[in-house]
Amino acid sequence: MPKVLDALTGLGRSSTLARKAAPESGELAPIWQPPVFVTCPGCERRATRRAWAESMYVCPNCGRYQPIGGYYRLSLILDHGTFRELDEKLEGSDPLDFPGYKEKLAKQTRKTGLSDAAIAATGKIEGMPAVVVVLDSHFFMGSMGTAVGEKVTRAIEYATNKKLPLIIFSASGGARMQEGILSLMQMAKTSAAIADFSAKGGLYISYLTHPTTGGVTASFASLGDIMLAEPGALIGFAGPRVIEQTIGEKLPAGFQRSEFQEEHGFVDAIVPRSEMKATLAQILRLHSKGGRRG
Amino acid sequence: MIKEVLRQIDDMDKELKALGEDRSAEVKQRRKQLEQARAELLEGCNSLSAADKVFLARHPHRPKIDEYIDALFTDFFVQRGDRQCKEDPSILGGIALYKGKPVTVIGHRKGNTLEENMKYNFGMPGPEGYRKALRMMKQAEKFGRPIITFIDTPGAYPGKEAEERGQGEAIARNLAEMSTLTVPVIAVVTGEGSSGGALALGVGNRVLMLENAIYSVLSPEGFASILWKDASRHEEACDVMKLTAQDLLNYKVIDEIIPEPLGGAQLDHQALFANVDAALERNLSQLSRLSGSALASQRHKKFRQMGEV
């Protein structure tokens, strides 16, 4: 009875993802709950939580993009019942014995329910299998320490071995300061993994979301075969404050935003959240037939 | 503080020089006195704090890339430009002979005078510098030349044009491409190795580091300002960042420490060059026995293991 078993497995997987994405998707909220209003930090106008969820956390009033959690994002793109998490238990450590860091990590875990800032999974997008990694900016600003570097690298290696396409959603403040030089080395580690994946003919779609900066920009996030970005995301190596201090002048509006990166030739397309799944599926389809590996 | 010790040594050196060649007993004794005191002071430099090492790593008289090239290589031919838009002088590189064999040499260039510092942007490259370096490395691979890099930079330049031309992409591309090179790559951290701007020349089969050099995710000042919103706490940052050669050897981020003369490389360039030369020759001869694919795979594995959870 393989079919029944498949369905049951799928049920388990979809409910796991649904549960993990629930705080944002609102799926588990009782229908009789009074409307909760959420204020947009951009236009400062309010909308109901339901309206926010329906627009995938793009402000219903002004169109500003709010950061979303990793599991919620996965729930928006993966086909029902196909989610399977990779290295779920892999968590951060304190390699340099940095004062106060262990406590901070524990606090971030309590706050977000995440073991560190990266989530990796396999699943299908419109029926096409892929490995998907999401950096969650709610955990330590999505910064990359050894746990993020290791999880991203393992996901890339998994995609290499299974000959699956790779999609990485980046959102990061850069290197995790508290893990010092070892954070820096994660840039080399992840980039080398991408180089190997690429040499073996793998398709890597890099999807930049707000904000992608520092060591993540200067490693795997910039190495996609296809580069996508969410509208209005801050994407750069140095942060705007550092640049302004260095050059002693104010930066123009829109500097380092997605649209700026597209204009300067570093992004193939700016893709709204509402078209995220369809665009990914289109690119996967374009690589699924013909070509050297077809 | 090493700063105070160096000032005293400097005073003694001045006095010794002023004494000149006078052979009178009085002067002889004073000279002996001074030399003994100097030696004792240097002996005290045996165990330096992290902040002391940061000071030495940035010392204005520490040898720079062009001096290393003059001392260790012959027939240096400078290569310029990224073949896309410009020449970035904050990276110096080209082809040279090492022990009679051709190699590609690349390093951050800070300059020795303020004028030079400005011209070379204090050793802070833009994307063009990294693209030039990558171009030279790919060419070295084509002609089967080993690559030797010298790292000494406060970081990649955080400027407007640098961002417009893709500073992040340029560094990322170097990291990815360097990991696949089929020729020996030896990286030597000679001064300050700060952030991705240093690592972009640092993906080597061997990473060597001078005894008083530093290598870190960010400058101590930047670190303190990000973490504690207070750049003045940089000395405190030096201690917790684990940026000394001894720390990094423990974490297996580097493979070997190259000893410096007591009191720092700036006191005796020739002694330092001899140590660097010995380390380079030994490592290069070990690596030269490996095949191209073995070199790429050794390098890949080496960085794969860093911060393995």
Image: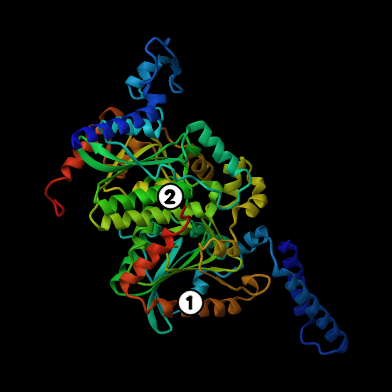
Q: Is residue B271 above or below residue A265?
A: below
Q: Is residue A77 above or below residue B191?
A: above
B28 sits to left or right of B131: right
Disc 2: which chain? A
Front position among marks 2 and 1: 2
Identify the secondary structure beneath mark 1.
Answer: helix
Q: Are marks 2 and 1 on the same chain?
A: no
Q: Residue at x 43, y 78 (%)?
A: B286
B222 sits to left or right of A78: right
Q: Quadrant of the N terminus of chain B?
A: bottom right
- The quarter holding residue B77 reads bottom left
Q: Which residue, given by chain and number where applicable, does mark 2 sit on?
A: A149
* Closer to us: B202 or B20: B202
Evaluate whether residue B197 shows in this view: yes
Disc 1: which chain? B
Residue B239 in picture, x, y percent from top left: 65, 54
Q: Which residue, given by chain and number where applicable, does mark 1 sit on?
A: B280
The total of numbered circles placed on residues is 2
